Image: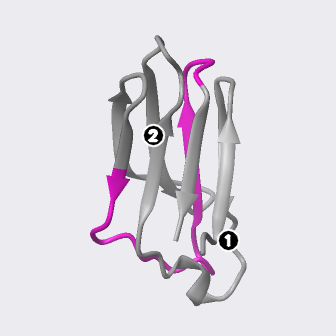
Amino acid sequence: MARVYKNISSPTTVTLIPKGFNRLDGNIKKITIANQASATNSTVKLFLDNGTSDFTITKTVIPPQVTLVLTDNLSFDSSIFNLKITTDSVADITIIIK
């Protein structure tokens, strides 16, 4: 079952997992980021933020109708970091975190 499921359809930054919760909230096995658009590329940046610094997990262009799947080294201490994503287009982006 998904722990976080978000849809984004505008250029924005979204907090996926806010800091301040217990460490298990950052125990992530898999993240999928899908570009649902039929013709628009989207640049996405997935990163950790501690309030003063950002730590990039990935920054990439996702073509239309393509899903990026991340499975390695995703766990983090959510009592210290926010997990955030930034998108730069109006493409419909779907994020699922398990």
- Nearer to the camera, 63 or 27: 63
Residue at 60% x, 69% y: name it: 2
SS category of the residue bearing label 1: loop
Residue topped by disc 2: 45
Indicate whether 70 appears above or below 98: above
Q: Main secondary structure of the magenta part?
A: loop
Mark 2 to mark 1 CA distance (whole Å) = 18 Å
Residue at 71% x, 82% y: name it: 21
Q: Which residues are magenta?
A: 69-91
Q: Amino acid at mark 1?
A: Lys
- Nearer to the camera, 3 or 44: 3
Q: Is residue 47 left or right of residue 18?
A: left
- Nearer to the camera, 52 or 75: 75
Q: Is residue 54 left or right of residue 71?
A: right
Q: Check if mark 2's residue and mark 1's residue have beta carbons within 8 Å.
A: no
Task: Using the rendered view, name the quadrant where residue 8 is placed.
Answer: top right
Q: Amino acid at mark 2?
A: Lys
The residue lying furthest to the left in this view is: 72
Task: Using the rendered view, name the quadrant where residue 52 is placed.
Answer: bottom right
Residue topped by disc 1: 19
Spot occupied by residue 73 in the image (x, y as percentages of width and height): 30, 72
Spot occupied by residue 83 in the image (x, y as percentages of width and height): 57, 60
Would residue 72 be counted in the magenta stretch? yes
Indicate whether 37 appears above or below 51: above
Indicate whether 44 appears above or below 1: above
Q: Residues within 10 Å of mark 2 (few under 14, many from 20)?
A: some
Spot occupied by residue 50 in the image (x, y as percentages of width and height): 57, 63
SS category of the residue bearing label 2: strand
